[in-house]
Image (spheres, rainbow, N blue to C red):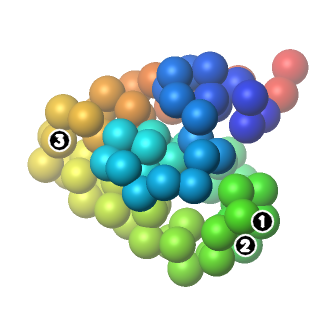
């Protein structure tokens, strides 16, 4: 499922960097996984982060989506319909 999300955003979302594009793409993936039913701690383990980082990322993305931030909308549009399983 991580591979499908990577392909959808076009970035290596597992890369340990705080560059804006990567962080925002990761936040969109966090939200997609959480919306699918994964817990924040479970998502954190998948990416090697703490659950608080996942919580922050989801909240940050939702805040940016609420103001129609172009980059946030772009990444969310890429992942929101990704099928995590066949």
The local secondary structure at tag 2 comes to helix
The reply to whether dot 3 and dot 2 touch (C-beta < 8 Å) is no
- The answer for how far apart the CA atoms under marks 3 and 2 are is 27 Å
Q: How many neighbours does mark 3 have within 10 angstroms: few (below 14), some (14-19), or many (20 or more)?
A: few
Residue drawn at the location 39% of the way across and 32% of the way down: 75
Indicate the secondary structure of the residue bearing disc 1. helix
Which residue lies under the disc numbered 1?
45
Q: Nearer the viewer, mark 1 or mark 2?
A: 1
Compared across the picture, whether 68 is left or right of 16 comes to: left
Residue 77 position in % (x across, y down): 40, 26
Q: Quadrant of the C terminus?
A: top right
Disc ID at residue 30: none
User: If you read the primary sequence from the N terminus, does the residue marked by circle 3 or circle 2 appear first?
Assistant: 2
Determine whether label 1 and label 2 are within 8 Å by CB. Answer: yes
Q: Kindly identify which numbered label has been placed on residue 69.
A: 3
Find residue 19 and report its horizontal and vertical position in percent.
Answer: 36, 50
Q: Residue at x 70, y 25 (%)?
A: 4
Q: Which residue is mark 2?
A: 41
Q: Which is nearer the N-term, disc 1 or disc 3?
A: 1
Visible residue check, residue 1: yes
Residue 13: x percent and y percent?
58, 41
Say left or right for 2 vs 50.
Answer: right
Name the residue: 74% across, 29% down.
3
Q: CA distance from mark 1 to mark 3?
A: 28 Å
Q: Secondary structure at mark 3?
A: loop
Compute the Cα span from label 1 to label 2.
6 Å
Q: Callout 1 environment at 10 Å: few (<14), some (14 to 19), or many (20+)?
A: few
For the question of whether residue 39 can be seen, the reply is no
**Which of the pair 31/26 is nearer the observer?**
26
């Amino acid at each position: 499922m991580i591979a499908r999300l990577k392909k959808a955003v076009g970035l290596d979302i597992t890369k340990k960097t705080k560059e804006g594009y990567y962080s925002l793409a990761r936040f969109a993936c966090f939200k997609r996984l959480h919306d699918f039913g994964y817990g924040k701690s479970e998502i954190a383990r998948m990416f090697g982060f703490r659950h608080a980082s996942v919580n922050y990322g989801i909240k940050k993305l939702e805040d940016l989506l609420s103001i129609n931030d172009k980059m946030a909308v772009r990444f969310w549009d890429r992942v929101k319909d990704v099928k995590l399983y066949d």
